[in-house]
């Protein structure tokens, strides 16, 4: 795979020469981003309030681990516990008229269940060439294409409390989905749109065991947050670090978390 990419036979990744790469710290060893931590700390009350909202759905979040597709289940590592609970909660509380999801699978199941339980008429659109879990039985419009082939005009239809849900390649390079999202789509979506980005560990580094993935999306997210045009609504990682006691008072403490899984949802609202 690497050789084909390097020789220009078939692009299957990125090879970026960097003279001092061997001298750089390895992913997972970087210190906390202190400026970002200050911004996250200002969202304490908002995040505590969101935990209360999750807790209000304690009975509804008792999904069975043995449930058959397309129902949501907890025993999976792709979109575990707090991520699933937060997606379910925000859909029921904010009652969006439209959700556009970039990257689909287990998250789609949680949001579809929330739409059903709340009795909403939400239009759920999935853009993913290869969903990571079956969604064919759900009431969802599935576009099995890459983001660069989507008509950008669809994102201008998102209104206040509608959702742009992102769990894509996590790679910020020219022409990738992350590039399209941050530099073409975020500028045109309406104020009040809710944005979810997955696999975000801010204000901390990615974990050491993920260093081989070479993700760099959260570096772009950090810049986005510091720009002041996006408000932090909820962060799974920040909540786990700072509000463990509050979390375990509710349903989260009773939900199984599989080994080797990370809860990494970040919810923002465009100002």
Image (cartoon, rainbow, N blue to C red):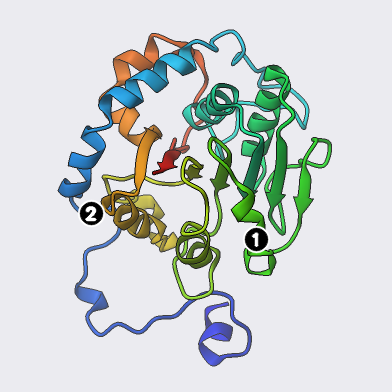
Residue in front for this viewpoint, 216 or 39: 39
Q: Which mark is residue 193?
A: none
113 sits left or right of 202 in the view: right
Residue under the image location 52 percent in, 18 percent down: 255
- Image coordinates of residue 169 in percent, x first then y, are 54, 59
Q: Element at badge 1? A: helix
Quadrant where the N terminus is found in the figure: bottom right
Residue under the image location 27 percent in, 62 percent down: 26
Q: Does residue 187 sit above or below 142 in this rendering?
A: below
- Image coordinates of residue 125 in percent, x first then y, are 71, 46
- Image coordinates of residue 175 in percent, x first then y, are 53, 74
Q: Does residue 246 sit above or below 18 in this rendering?
A: above
**Which residue corresponds to mark 1?**
153
The local crowd at label 1, few if under 14, some if 14 to 19, many if 20 or more residues have their Cα within 10 Å, is: few
Residue in front for this viewpoint, 152 or 88: 152
**Which residue corresponds to mark 2?**
29
Q: Is residue 32 visible?
A: no
28 sits left or right of 94 in the view: left
The local crowd at label 2, few if under 14, some if 14 to 19, many if 20 or more residues have their Cα within 10 Å, is: few
Quadrant where the C terminus is found in the figure: top left
């Amino acid at each position: 795979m690497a050789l084909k990419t390097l020789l220009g036979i078939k692009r299957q990744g990125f090879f970026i020469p960097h003279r001092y790469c061997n001298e750089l710290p390895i992913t997972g060893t970087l210190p906390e981003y202190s400026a970002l931590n200050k911004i996250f700390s200002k969202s304490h009350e908002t995040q505590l309030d969101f935990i209360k909202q999750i807790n209000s759905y304690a009975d509804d979040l008792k999904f069975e681990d043995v449930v058959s597709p397309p129902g949501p289940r907890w025993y999976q590592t792709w979109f575990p516990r707090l991520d699933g609970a937060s997606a379910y909660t925000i859909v029921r509380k904010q009652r969006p008229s439209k959700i556009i999801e970039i990257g689909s699978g287990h998250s789609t199941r949680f949001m579809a269940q929330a739409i059903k339980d709340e009795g909403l008429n939400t239009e759920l659109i999935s853009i993913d060439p290869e969903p990571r879990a079956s969604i064919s039985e759900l009431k969802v419009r599935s576009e099995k294409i890459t983001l660069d082939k989507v008509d950008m005009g669809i994102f201008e239809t998102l209104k206040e409390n509608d959702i742009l849900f992102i769990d894509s390649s996590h790679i910020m390079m020219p022409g990738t989905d992350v590039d399209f999202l941050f530099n073409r789509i975020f500028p045109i979506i309406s104020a009040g749109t809710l944005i979810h980005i997955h696999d975000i560990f801010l204000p901390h580094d990615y974990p050491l065991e993920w260093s081989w993935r070479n993700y760099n999306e959260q570096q772009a997210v950090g810049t986005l947050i510091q720009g002041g045009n996006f408000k932090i609504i909820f962060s799974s990682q920040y909540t786990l670090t700072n509000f463990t006691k509050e979390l375990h008072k509710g349903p989260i403490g009773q939900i199984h978390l599989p080994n080797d899984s990370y809860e990494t949802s970040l919810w923002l609202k465009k100002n």
